Amino acid sequence: MLNLLVNPIAGGKKGKRMIKNLALIENRLKNHNAEYAVYRTEKRGDATVLTKKLIEGGADNVIVVGGDGTLHEVINGFSRFDKVALGIIPCGTGNDFAAALGIPEDPVKATDIIVNGEPQFTDYMQMPTVRGLNIIGMGIDVEVLKLYAASKKKTKLTYTKCLIKALVGFKPVKFAAALDDGEKISYESFMACVANGHRYGGGIPICPVANPRDKKLDFIAVKGMGKLKITAAVIKLKAGKILTIKETTHKNMQTVKIMPEAEHYTVNVDGELYEDIPFEVKIVSDELRVYNKK
């Protein structure tokens, strides 16, 4: 039995896109003679609650039909990882973590992967109070997400527009980072993130070399710079060349602790905003299994 956990409004257009996608998915499952059940979310947080209920009830899989936000809720609903697999049929606006795993956005092809593929170990990021799958960060991306949340239209282009708008008047964030090799670094940065996947914001390649199966975290920080340099840096970021910027620091590690100078701060975890949570991250491998091609 495949347990489809569906976010009815994922992908925008007031749910019309999901109605079409879900019909395609169900028809494909019927063609495969696969048994399935559909569980729909109604409000924020439902995916976490439903996931917990399914797993505690003995389910051996949770298939997310939605985007990165739904995935974030689901991974935080896993009460155990043994004998439970995660499936992803990307139907959101960004679908960044699915892209990191090479899962196609075509709902029929993604469904075929779940039916014909197999669960494979995939890394996730553990913080003291929350889990992340894709990107954890602070700085300019937090301001972008605040602007994006206030936008009426939510598309990939909207995210880029919000990024440009956020750059106006943005002041670098001061923080220190403690790495697992004992190194401590102090920064005045316009962006710092810990990456498991390689992109965010619907395709922006924040860390092109990140791989959610390499058992490593990728730490990226871009030091503060003037507005002209920031504009050039954003162009390079969009082109997947952030690692070529001389102000960029990139390191691999198993754990990292980031200590903001400000008393109050906001952290972006997979596109969800959290206030004043401990910014300590460790990579966890060999627990979470995600359906992919054999």
Image (cartoon, rainbow, N blue to C red):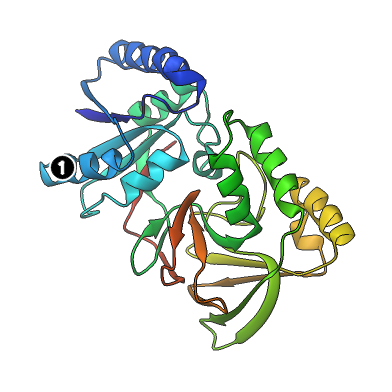
Q: Is residue 245 above or below residue 149?
A: below
Furthest-left residue in this view? 57
Lateral position of residue 164 relative to residue 152, left or right: right
152 or 219, which lies in front?
Answer: 152
Label 1: how many residues lie within 10 Å, few (<14), some (14-19) or many (20+)? some
Q: Quadrant of the C terminus?
A: top left
Q: Is residue 139 above or below residue 85?
A: below
Residue occupying image coordinates x 36% and y 29%: 7
What percent of the width, then of the height, locates residue 143? 61, 53
Look at 60% across and 44% down and name the residue there: 147
The residue that label 1 is drawn on is 53
Identify the image quadrant of the N terminus: top left
Question: For numbered disc 1, what is the local secondary structure?
Answer: helix
- Residue 185 in view, yes or no: yes
267 or 205: nearer the viewer: 267
Q: Amino acid at mark 1?
A: Lys
The relative height of residue 166 versus residue 25 in the rendered view (above or below) is below
Q: Residue at x 51, y 62 (%)?
A: 266
Quadrant housing residue 20 = top left
Judge left or right: residue 141 versus residue 215: right
Q: Nearer the viewer, residue 189 or 131?
A: 189
